Image (cartoon, grey):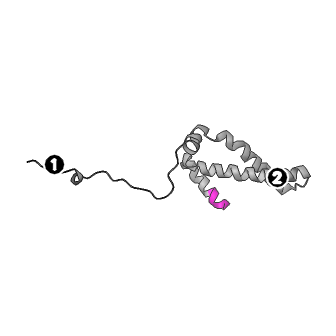
Amino acid sequence: MLGAVALLAVLGIRYPLKMLPLLFFEFVWKSIWVFAFGLPLLLSGGLDPNTTETLTACLMGVALVPLVMPWGYALKHYLRAPGDRWGKQVTVRPPLPSDKPKTYQH
């Protein structure tokens, strides 16, 4: 999974705005790890050198992602944009020339 995220992050260099969901994903999972695992271990004194390194890396991600996030774009396109309708989609086709009402002259 982390390999796929790394490959998508490389793709994000070319298309940064299209990869914002990946940045959201990184922020969320690192935040979850910090609050669910890292901080409890830190507060209980149970950190080993490997866990300390992971905690440091995750804290950097949690601190840096909000700084580099284009918040105006993200709010406009992900929170304020109207969503697509759920359920069966109805496609309306434009009228064809043969669909015009016939007019009869007497």
| Residue 54 on image: x %, y % | 79, 54
**Which residue is tagged 1?**
103
Question: Which amino acid type is shown beneath numbered disc 2?
Answer: Gly
Q: Is 2 inside the magenta-drawn segment? A: yes
Residue positioned 49% across, 58% down in the render: 87
| Residue 16 on image: x %, y % | 56, 46
Residue positioned 51% across, 55% down in the render: 86
Q: Is residue 85 above or below residue 4?
A: above
Label 1 to label 2: alpha-carbon separation: 78 Å
Q: Which mark is residue 1?
A: none
Residue positioned 78% across, 51% down in the render: 34
Q: Which of pointers 1 and 2 lies earlier in the amino acid sequence?
A: 2
| Residue 46 on image: x %, y % | 90, 55
Magenta range is 1-6
Residue 57 in the figure: left or right of residue 87? right
Q: Which mark is residue 38?
A: 2
Residue 92 in the figure: left or right of residue 42? left
Q: Residues within 10 Å of mark 1 (few under 14, many from 20)?
A: few
